Image (tube, coloured by chain):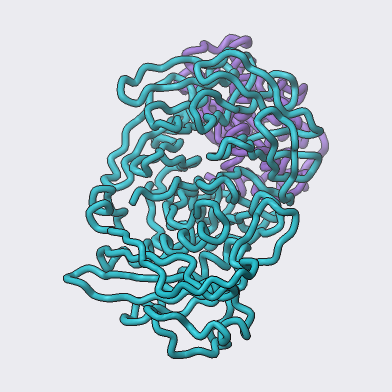
Amino acid sequence: MMLPRRSTLLGGVTLAAIGATIGVTPPARAQLTIDMTRPSFEPVPIAIVDFAGDRVGADIANVVRNDLQGSGLFRSISPGSFIQRDVDANAPPRFQDWRSIGAAGLVVGSVQQVGGNIKVDFRLWDVVVGQQATGLSFTSQPANWRRLAHIIADAIYKRVTGEDGYFDTRVAYVSETGSRSSRVKRIAIMDQDGANNRYITDGRTLALTPRFSPTLQEIVYMAYGEDRGPPRVYLQNVDSARRELLGNFPGMSFAPRFSPDGTKVVMSISADGATNIYEMDIRGRGTRRLTSSPAIDTSPCFSPDGTQIVFNSDRGGAQQLYVMGAGGGGERRISFGDGRYATPVWSPRGDFIAFTKISGSTFGIGVMRPDGGGERMLTSGFLVEGPTWAPNGRVLMFFTQGRGGPVGLQQVDITGRFQRSVPTPTEASDPAWSPLIPQ
Amino acid sequence: MRLIKALSAVAALAFLAACSSEQQAAATSGTSTTVAPGSVADFTQNVGDRVYFDTDMSSIRADGRQTLDRQAEWLKKYTNYPVTVAGHCDERGTREYNLALGERRANAARQYLIAQGIPASRIKTTSYGKENPDPPGSDEQAWALNRRAVTELQ
């Protein structure tokens, strides 16, 4: 499936609030909220009824259940245990029926065909206090039903956690097939939940390290040519598949990443054994060198306000993390623990930098504050590498491999409490999480 | 390519089993005549197309210097091949850093060959990081063989 263009979506999705139908407000403490920053909490039990009115309604409910359950913050109650079977999408439910199966929240919805489009309404009921928590209505093309489901899941997540959701997003990654010694590595893009997978490169040469532009319209990645020459960085339009080389440098260029405003790409360029960081203006193609060391400076990533760049360098011996000004200069080391630090990525919220850490024979994914303080490891294993942030800065995706085993994607929340694998059609590595898809 | 290498290895083993220790020494030091002198196979089998590195290092080891000396001698004799030195790493590093480390290893081998008199213009470098393990494997033995710079004849 082609990604819908932004303009199509703007024209195709409309959104309206649905007013509350009753005004009962008991002074009970609401349990349909969750504070993710607390040291411990139980997942919110939530009942999601198949949406009424159309066959796609059950599919929409399934996507919403899967999104919420997969976040680790919700427990989706099995529909088989529901007591009220005749719940009306537009009237208050029998709250006692839902309380008695332990639900704190109840989601009901309906689907209508309206002149070639579908209109999807949903309400989130706070079962504990017995009132509507939120209600929204969307209209879009029928082919967009999965996106509508993700948007609904995001609305529920936001109402319950107070944080923006991350379900209406995509993931670019490296699809890996074939034997270890003749591996085919292609860039692929899928929805965050593994649906709508498609390939962006043809697999004739190795392609690695895809990164989204802020609008999701373009990706940058590194690929080898057909001539056994050094790999180079390419910019590719996701819809048209038109691709262009970003700079024809004599040495290899790699590790690209967009600036937050999408006007620049930072990357590493190697020459004579040294690897330095450069930025390129996408329109004018002017190139500026940002670091000048005889060492390896790579994996640059902008702060979300665009004023700083974090990168890793072995200029002091082992690989460590450094932060510098966006135009270069003022470089300072921020990692000081035992081991080697790599692949730093700045949270979209600005509060943390996630990284890969290699200590002895173990790899780990951790976070630290941008000043280097508060280092905390979230997960570890034989190989865990390459974290990427969900747009809300609360969840990380990365890739993992057991000794000699298959490589695949996993996600973990920033507390490290909840980790799970992410389904992919093939073995997969090097995920890049997109921002929320523009509506 | 891989099949040819494997077959010639089997042939060499059979040959070694039947020969005296003097002949073994001759065979391993590169005077085997089973391939045409000056061919790619001659280079990979009799000269040695690759040198190995210690963990996270890019300095040429003593065993690597011997291989590169033989490579330089051969390349001076057979001047029709431009070469690309491809650097590789084991899987115990991160992808982007290993791309750079592989380039650093390729560059170290290139500089050594230049110092032995091979024109700089004749030698390009590239890096595959940890993407092309040879042999595949997840143990110390495989990793030691994967930390390599391979001189490829064009």
In the image, A216: left or right of B118?
left
Residue A267 rendering spot, x and y as whole percentages: 49, 27
Q: Could one spot residue A416 in this view of the protein?
A: yes
Q: How many marks?
A: 0
Tell me, yes or no, if residue A185 can be seen here. Answer: no
Q: Determine the image quadrant of residue B22.
A: top right
Q: Image point 57% across, 85% down: which residue?
A: A96
Q: Colour of chain A?
A: cyan
Left or right: residue A128 versus residue A198 is right
Q: Nearer the viewer, residue A304 or B67?
A: A304
Q: Position of residue B80 (x, y in %)?
A: 45, 20
Who is closer to the viewer here, A311 or A130?
Answer: A130
Looking at the picture, tell me which residue is in the foreground, B70 or A211: A211
Q: Residue furthest left?
A: A115
- Kindly identify the residue that appears in the image at 47 percent across and 82 percent down: A93
Quadrant position of the N terminus of chain A in the picture? bottom left
* Colour used to depict chain B in the structure image: purple
Decide if residue A117 is on the left or right side of residue A230: left
x, y percent for residue A222:
45, 36
Question: Residue B77 appears at what percent x and percent y?
Answer: 54, 17
Residue found 64% across the figure and 80% down from its top: A102
Q: Is residue A151 left or right of residue A361?
A: left
Q: Is residue A148 above or below residue B43?
A: below
Give above or below for A122 relative to A364: below
